[in-house]
Amino acid sequence: MDLDFRYKELLEVIDSFKPFDADIALILGSGLGEFADEVNTVKTIATNALPDYPHSTVQGHKGFIHWAEHKGKRVIIFQGRIHFYEGYKIHETVLPVLIAKRNKSKYLLLTNAAGGINNLFKPADLMLINSINAIAIKKELTNLLGIASLEQKNNMLDFPSDYLMRIIKDAAGKEKIELKEGVYYFSKGPSYETPSEIKMMAKTGSDAVGMSTAHEALFAVANGIQTAGISCITNLAAGISKVKLSHHEVMETAGIVKEKFERLVKRTIELI
């Protein structure tokens, strides 16, 4: 599918509205949207004012695009992502990445809330994603990008960006933030995983599970954008946690980690 043609009107509206192109793009995950208030916002547009842009239906995803500046760096921030489990098609879920590409972004930082599978993880940990398990979405991505594109770009191996990984680790060191590292398992949702599914994921070597990020990462890399991801471990996964999982728990833990997360992302932007 030619997404530039499919979303021609949307992209033209953004072109007429944006104050500048941004080298860095940032997609904020559940409960992490308040970061947008911590930088110098130059211009904002509500996504519900854009033609063909899906409406966010999930708590913690406000639905705004911000053009901002931080320490001389220009950033486009997506405050609220589009989830596959909301019923949207795969080409709709990657719209933020398409817009970032249109804004000439060279780097993309993905953030999300995730359930911890690794027994050494605890809620409020931050995990640098070193690989993704995207079996559940690979067919849809192949249909969207085309097999030739996937083979040519070899995008499964190009995520995460070695350069951004070094930058994020350096940022964590400078901010004295303990940064875990691990494999992110993508689940389509919308329901949380069962304990038996979590056991299966653990056997594949996965450290955290969530319902976003994988399709954005692979689509971005296929389009030449250096990409990396950070997961906020907001809860322990089913079968590991002794309490029933809920979105409220996700939001609550994201609020606890807010200050640490903001420092890490700000420093990362500064170092790019």
Image (cartoon, rainbow, N blue to C red):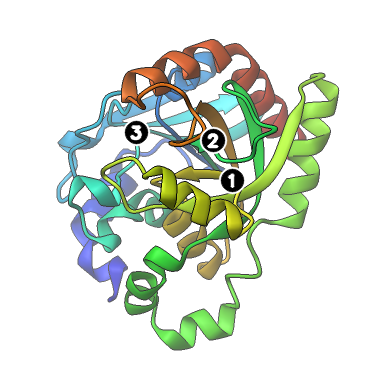
Q: Secondary structure at mark 2?
A: strand
Q: Amino acid at mark 1?
A: Asp
Q: Check the picture and name the quadrant holding the N terminus.
A: bottom left
- Image position of 121 with respect to 13: above or below: above
User: Can you identify the residue that label 2 sits on?
Assistant: 75
Q: Residue furthest bottom?
A: 148
The location of residue 86, given as percent across then percent down, is 21, 45
Is 160 displayed left or right of 135 in the figure? Answer: right
Q: Amino acid at mark 2?
A: Val
Residue at point 56%, 50% (across, down): 184
For the residues labelled 1 and 2, the Cα–Cα distance comes to 6 Å
Query: Residue 210: in sight, yes or no?
Result: yes
Q: Who comes first in sequence, dot 2 or dot 3?
A: 2
User: Can you identify the residue that label 1 sits on?
Assistant: 23
Is 256 displayed left or right of 269 in the figure? Answer: left
Q: Residues within 10 Å of mark 2 (few under 14, many from 20)?
A: many
Q: Are marks 1 and 2 in contact (CB under 8 Å)?
A: yes
For the residues labelled 3 and 1, the Cα–Cα distance comes to 20 Å
